[in-house]
Amino acid sequence: MVGRSFHAALGLAVLVACSQHSAQDSEQPSGDPPTGNDQVPENGGTDGGTTPDAPTTPDAPTTPDAPATPDAPGTPVAACPVGIAAFTHAIGLANPDQRSDIAVDAAGNVLFATAAPAGTTGNANGVTKLSPSGDVLLTLPFGSVVATDAAGNFYVAGAFSAPLDVGLGVMQPEGNVDVFVAKFDSAGKPVFAQPLRLCGDGVTSIAVDATGRIAVSGTALGTVVLSPTGALQFTVAVSGDVAFNSHGVLIIGGSAVAGTDLGDGPVLAGDVTSAGFLLAVDGNGQRVFSHVFPGKETVLVNSVAVDSADNIVFTGFYTLSIVLFGDEYRAQFAQESGRFTGGFSAKLDPNGAVIWKHGTGTTELNGIAVDVAGNVILTGASTGNAGFNRITDVQKLGPTGASLSITEMFPATGYGRGFSVATDACGSIYLSAVAVDSFAPRVTSAYVVKLTK
């Protein structure tokens, strides 16, 4: 299924002026997000742990040459701590729609970043590094997304519109808003910093592969892949959440407007505001496979992750309906805001064939991760409390997609929602969430929550 060069086919169509934004910018809910309930799929679709009829497996993609092992040795994974309790760490926010992002290193330290809503600048609080017990190790006053590598280094990316110094000299932005990428060692010492000289509104995601290659994605940026030293290798003209597999194949999950071509024909307009997509490209930027998920209105793929066997999991939510691998699922009317939404998730093999899928779920799904046992962790929001009917939740699915547990938190005074989730080598779950703590006066906080195994 390897097609022509994806970025050549698309003509870099979304590398547009900083004032223009993708459908994900305009359709991502602000304030109180929409809600909905589950609905049995039409057309006999499966939902839950039952595996659907196996689709025809595509020809195995050509595996790129094995990358060279980086010079820096990996940091040995620390023994699972005994007696370290769960914790919650809060940071005040100016805007309840600010996104948050987390990553966990091999020693169990958590990196936590907050950013302005997609399509805007400002309101970024930067990055905080916490120990496995929740103690603050360092803070950085910049960056909106974070990633880690096996050696304990961490990587930060974000937008900047004024001169910025991360510790290696001043970087000057190009245009109204530029993007920077910086690498830090485990102690927080900067290793390199690189301005991308590309439009920087709405930086959404960063990922690092086993060799140190870096992918950064943003709503006006598209997705760029950099060498381990920060040199630009190639650009893909769509944006979303990003993850690498063990062979350096890059997975991008996001939302596409009508006319976007992933390499196998344009997304049709119809009555779709935006369709969700999943795209895999190899180490040279060539398309390996892609999937499009249309609906009656808007479909948002919000998060992707890859497990130890290179299986791909992804999640998001939709308004009204979604067609997920041939089956249509519909959301039901919810009292909150009078809207229809439903969450979805799926697991694919390394070639993009379906292992399981859930077309209905909680009201909103934003983050996904896989733990050491192959369980899938989801975060977002469900309905059920008074007032804004918004409760942050964490769901745990088994490797076959069967539901294992649901944890709810932050019902409080206003709404809450989970944005990002990660796990450590001991099976603990780390959640980033935003919640309105009070309305008189209005107080909003971003939270890191550690849930021990």
Image: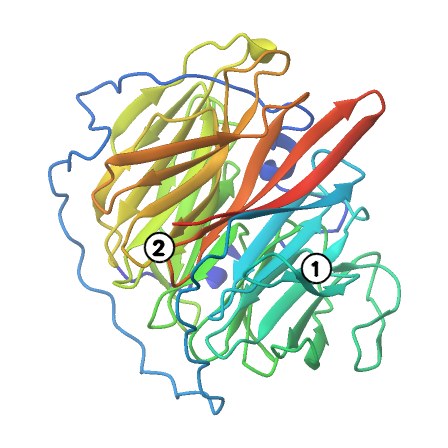
The image's colouring method is rainbow
From the top left corner, tell me how far across and down residue 285 is, in percent.
44, 68
- Residue identifier under label 1: 127
Task: Please tell me which residue lies in front, 145 or 422.
Answer: 422
Task: Please tell me which residue lies in front, 446 or 333.
Answer: 446
Query: How much space separates mark 1 and mark 2, taking CA atoms?
Result: 23 Å
From the top left corner, tell me how far across and down residue 377 is, in percent.
39, 44
- Position of residue 96 relative to residue 174, above or below, is above
Q: Residue furthest bottom?
A: 71
Question: On the image, which quarter does residue 221 sit in?
Answer: bottom right
Residue 279 visible, this angle:
no
Left or right: 366, with 160 as reference point: left
Q: Residues within 10 Å of mark 1 (few under 14, many from 20)?
A: many
Residue 196, numbered circle: none
- Position of residue 406 relative to residue 252, above or below, is above
- Residue identifier under label 2: 371
